[in-house]
Amino acid sequence: MSQPCTHLLLFGATGDLSKRMLLPSLFGLDADGLLPDCLRIIGTARSALDDAAFKALAAEALDSFVDADRRTPALVAKFLARLSYVPLDASAPEGFAALAQAVGDPAHLAIFLSTAPSLFGPTIAGLASAGLAGPGVRLALEKPLGSDLASSRVINDAVAAAYPEDRTFRIDHYLGKETVQNLLALRFGNTLFEPLWNAAGIDHVQITIAETVGLESRAGYYDGMGALRDMVQNHMLQLLALVAMEPPARFDPTSVRDEKVKVLRSLRPIDRASVEAHSVRGQYTAGAVGGAPVKGYAEELGGPSETETFVALKAHVDNWRWQGVPFYLRTGKRLPERMSEIIVQFKPVPHSMFGDATLTANKLIISLQPDENIGLTIMAKTPGLDREGLKLRSVPLDIGLANAFADVRRRIAYERLLLDLIEGQQTLFVRRDEVEAQWSWIDGIRAGWAATGMTPKPYGAGNWGPSAAIALTERDGVTWHD
Ligand code: BG6
């Protein structure tokens, strides 16, 4: 294992992600004694704060986002003592010398960039010129890493000019989620599934990430991106890659990421010819979510827009294992519930000996949120004397992970990712070739939309997207698992 770093430098330290996720995660790790004693956390952002004001901001963030029973005054004081702050305008190179001075000369330094992508280039150049890119320095980058293949290459080139790939940590926070890693345990820690995990055993796969929230004060960013680039390009394609990849030889960065990138490169392009049959764009209009009325997207935004807040796709992985198996993906805002899940629909038995009894093919349901659960539906006999033949019913075999591991605290994704960054473990971070394969597939879909003039179809907030999303699967005789 690599040496633990001694300092962590957080860009965007006063921002929303920092307050909601990064500071609470670091606190959680500290409270559990998982941070090296020597670790200092240096926050930086544009705001002209001093150390005391930054500590006050962090204390407030902990108050809001950490459970009260974990927040003892002694633990909070210990955590705050690690913090300091350096104001910096990342677009002005002269400020980086002061930053380097504040960082000092630690044996190891981890830098976390949670800033606007337009600042990535100047920030990296500033860090390098101030001597903060040497062999002991790791760089983590938070999305969005570009808005298409070309812009992501510009960012990747700027990063590569200062930090080699083995010190670059691209974050996809879905990889930090417990159930996402559990997918690997399920597939490769059991003999049960892998022999069937292919076109002979599986009919189709569904991946859904449904959200109830709308624009959430992110209009500037979201309207420029839309659901395809905000969610599919990263989180959904990473989930797809983990479901579809060949068994890696080891749980190490090269083995796992080599297998994922092969899947991403095998995605069948969705282009001008297929885009209308294989994709659906939607945008929410006024409606109700959770019983409360909500505005439509255009109203929230303050004007009309052609950005999609919902997307559904029928994807194919063109390799031997997955020939003919559709992967249906859908994600959207203002849907009826917050729910992320992967459904693996197995094929029916080849012959039923049970006469008229209906058999339902097995289904594996991997729920990522709000609850972490793995369920398998199996056919069982309905109790009775069966004078008119056996009656069967599909019943769930559930592993409620919250119950199975009731004694273990559920951690938020960033705890895992920050600790991996601090310790230099890259397996759960995305490699450059993966990101570029993801963008290249997404760019093809967008080019198809542009060429065919496909604009988002309206759906009322609180519905599962436009009706075309239902037709997308029903045409194949498949129903979305709601
Ligand atoms: C982010 C997207 O990457 O993921 C957001 O930018 C989205 O639009 C969020 O809300 C969803 O993450 P989670 O962990 O809440 O499912």
Image (spheres, grey):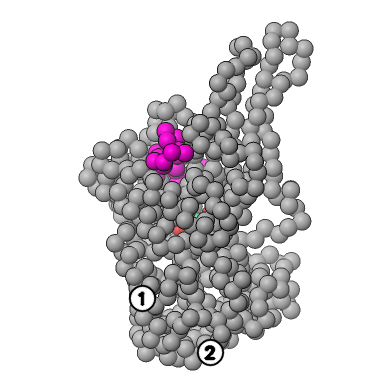
In the image, residue 241 sits, relative to residue 138, either above or below, namely above
- Write down the region rendered in magenta: 311-338
Task: Kindly identify which residue carries mark 1.
Answer: 161
Cα separation, mark 2 vs mark 1, equals 22 Å
Please name the residue shown 35% across and 43% down the image: 268
Front-most of residues 9 and 458: 9
Task: Kindly identify which residue carries mark 2.
Answer: 105
Furthest residue to the front?
249
Q: Amino acid at mark 2?
A: Asp
SS for callout 2: loop
In the image, residue 85 sits, relative to residue 185, either above or below, namely below
Q: Is residue 18 visible?
A: yes
Please name the residue shown 55% across and 81% down the image: 108
First-in-chain label (2 vs 1): 2
Q: Residues within 10 Å of mark 1 (few under 14, many from 20)?
A: few
Q: Residues within 10 Å of mark 2 (few under 14, many from 20)?
A: few
Q: Quadrant of residue 161?
A: bottom left
Residue 359 on image: x %, y %: 60, 21
